[in-house]
Image (tube, rainbow, N blue to C red):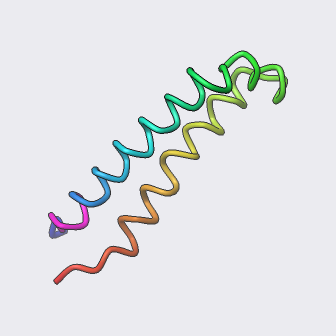
Amino acid sequence: MKLKKRKIKYSAIFFLCWFTFLVILVDGIIKFQTLVDYFGSYALTEITLLLLVILPTLAVYKFTNEK
């Protein structure tokens, strides 16, 4: 399997920016405990937040064109 450096670079940049944004949003503005109370489960909240980071990053990797 040949590594696609450009795709990995863009995905990593997106991952860092998106992860930072979600950390600021969840820890600073919304508060994590509020989300746990809303979802009713700590595990469900963690899984949802992880999927909100991983799935868009995979989409950026998939749709980035390699020259």
Percent of width and height locating residue 51: 57, 45
**Residue at the limit of the structure toward the bottom, as seen here:** 67
Percent of width and height locating residue 37: 82, 20
Say how many tags the image has: 0
Q: Is residue 53 left or right of residue 46?
A: left
Q: Nearer the viewer, residue 15 or 5?
A: 15
Percent of width and height locating residue 53: 50, 45
Location of residue 66 (image quadrant)? bottom left
Location of residue 42 (image quadrant)? top right
Predominant secondary structure, magenta span: helix
Whether residue 12 is situated above or below residue 23 in the rendered picture: below
Q: Nearer the viewer, residue 37 or 28?
A: 28
Q: What residue is rendered at 42% in x and 55% in y?
A: 57
Percent of width and height locating residue 38: 84, 27
Q: What residue is rendered at 65% in x and 39% in y?
A: 48
Q: What residue is rendered at 57% in x and 32% in y?
A: 25
Magenta residues span 4-8
Q: Is residue 21 left or right of residue 15?
A: right
Q: Is residue 21 left or right of residue 40?
A: left
